Image: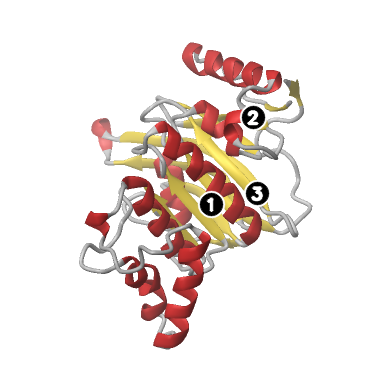
Amino acid sequence: METITPPGSSPSKLPEMVAFEKITKTFGEGPSAKIAIQDVSFVVEDLPNAGELITIVGPSGCGKSTLLRIIAGLLPHFPPTSGQARVFGKPIGQAGADRGLVDQKYSLLPHLTVLHNIAFGLMLRDVPRKERFARAHEWIAKVGLEGSENKYPYELSGGMQQRVSIAATLILGPRVLLMDEPFGALDPRIRLRMQELLIQLWKEQQGTVFLVTHSVEEAVYLGDRVFVMAAKPGRLVEILKVPRPDEPPEQARRNPWFINFTQELLRRLEQGEPTGATHTV
């Protein structure tokens, strides 16, 4: 790993997608106040015809989810206590359809079928019935759920429910996709398939993705950059550049560079040795 620059210090040459400047979030006041994240700074640019997938790793309690929810503009994590958070070059004001959030709870409506769950957001936007169902059918095909259109969430496996959740979010065309441990509850085989699906959909959308994960291998496989966080207080301590995946995760994980990279990152996380610099492989 070669040191390049400290996090957040490079001047932005392209339009900003998301930027944090010394963001701190504290819950509570006085002696009982808890610092969730402290002085977090980074810039994610709007890469033309490419987009960027950011993965975020770190120990429990380091503020990974807080970071996502500040980007999303969701209470009680938003607004930050100090610092400035921007999306598309403007201060974040509130939650908006330009940012979509997917987590491991799937967030599906139990009384709606797969088709109606995926089309629900379009209904809220007053998209005509024929158009929204046509677009929902397109996304059902994209996530490989043909034949399950009329099933309810309780009739689906965890992996299928997560596919519905991703389709219901991406059908709205968010420019920034926020994913909080989206595959954490899935068995290993399904998790690998979902990683492949995410890469495929992300390349089609060419958007910006922030994905929180506890799996170092998942972070290295999916991320263009890996944000490494530390706890007590939560802070961004390293940014690692990683090659884009061009093969299935099973194959990628057998590559010597991948093995060495993940082992070194695991060692740093376990020993608490992040250097506060940006690296690349």
Residue 240: % across, % down: 65, 30
Residue displayed at 24% across by 56% down = 155
According to the picture, the residue beneath numbered tag 1 turns out to be 84
According to the picture, the residue beneath numbered tag 2 turns out to be 252
| Observer-nearest of 81 and 151 | 151
Which mark identifies residue 242? none
Q: Is residue 257 left or right of residue 37?
A: right
On the question of residue 23 being in view, the answer is no
Image position of 278 with respect to 13: above or below:
above
Tell me whether circle 2 and circle 3 mark residues in contact (CB < 8 Å): no
Residue displayed at 68% across by 22% down = 255
Amino acid on which the number 1 mark rests in the picture: Gln
Tell me whether circle 1 and circle 3 mark residues in contact (CB < 8 Å): no
Image position of 243 with respect to 49: above or below:
above
Residue 43: % across, % down: 64, 46
Amino acid on which the number 2 mark rests in the picture: Ala
Q: From mark 1 to mark 2, how far is it between C-alphas?
A: 37 Å
Tell me whether circle 1 and circle 2 mark residues in contact (CB < 8 Å): no
Q: Quadrant of the N terminus?
A: top right
Label 3: which secondary element: strand
Q: From mark 1 to mark 3, how far is it between C-alphas?
A: 21 Å
Q: Earlier in the sequence, mark 2 or mark 3?
A: 3
Q: Is residue 14 left or right of residue 160?
A: right
Residue 199: % across, % down: 59, 48
| Observer-nearest of 90 and 191 | 191
Q: Earlier in the sequence, mark 1 or mark 3?
A: 3
Label 1: which secondary element: strand
Q: From mark 2 to mark 3, how far is it between C-alphas?
A: 19 Å
Image position of 116 with respect to 10: above or below:
below
According to the picture, the residue beneath numbered tag 3 turns out to be 52
Q: Nearer the viewer, mark 2 or mark 3?
A: 2
Q: Nearer the viewer, mark 1 or mark 3?
A: 3
